[in-house]
Image (tube, rainbow, N blue to C red):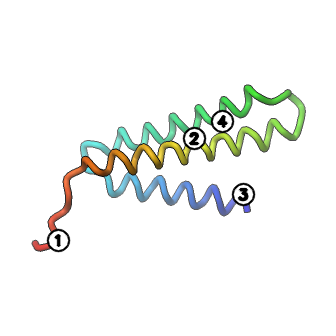
């Protein structure tokens, strides 16, 4: 199940970068990577070394960081120029 969740998040990240305007793609990618890494770091910081928690909490926190990035992208997307379907 974890591998499926990670695969979905990676696909979501690729989709978010692909729909971003060309001048915003790097920013979107950096935000996703930064928040994922920050979540992972928080997960490591709140657990004791040498326990199973260290593995699972850090992965869960990284997933949570990615989800926060997706919320940011969703809000940011409202200000992106709309594509004209009538062309």
Q: Quadrant of the N terminus?
A: bottom right
**Structural distance between the alpha carbons of marks 3 and 4:** 15 Å
Sequence-wise, the earlier of marks 1 and 4 is 4
C-alpha span from label 2 to label 3: 15 Å
Q: Nearer the viewer, mark 1 or mark 3?
A: 1
Residue at point 64%, 59% (across, down): 5
Q: Which mark is residue 85?
A: 1
Mark 1 to mark 4: distance in Å? 40 Å
Q: Residues within 10 Å of mark 3 (few under 14, many from 20)?
A: few
Secondary structure at numbered mark 1: loop
- Number of residues whose C-alpha sits closer than 10 Å to that of mark 2, classed few (under 14), some (14–19) or many (20 or more): many
Residue 42 x, y percent position in the rendering: 67, 30
- 5 above or below 64? below
Q: Considering the numbered disc 4 on the image, is that residue within a helix, a strand or a loop?
A: helix
Residue 2 - label: 3
- What is the residue that sits farthest to the left in this orientation? 87
């Amino acid at each position: 199940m974890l591998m499926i969740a990670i695969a979905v998040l990676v696909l979501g990240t690729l989709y978010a970068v692909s729909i971003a305007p060309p001048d915003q793609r790097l920013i979107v990618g950096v935000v996703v990577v930064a928040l994922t890494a920050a979540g992972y770091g928080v997960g490591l910081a709140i657990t004791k070394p040498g326990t199973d928690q260290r593995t699972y909490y850090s992965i869960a926190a990284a997933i949570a960081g990615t989800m926060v990035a997706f919320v940011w992208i969703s809000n940011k997307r409202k200000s992106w120029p709309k594509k004209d379907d009538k062309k």
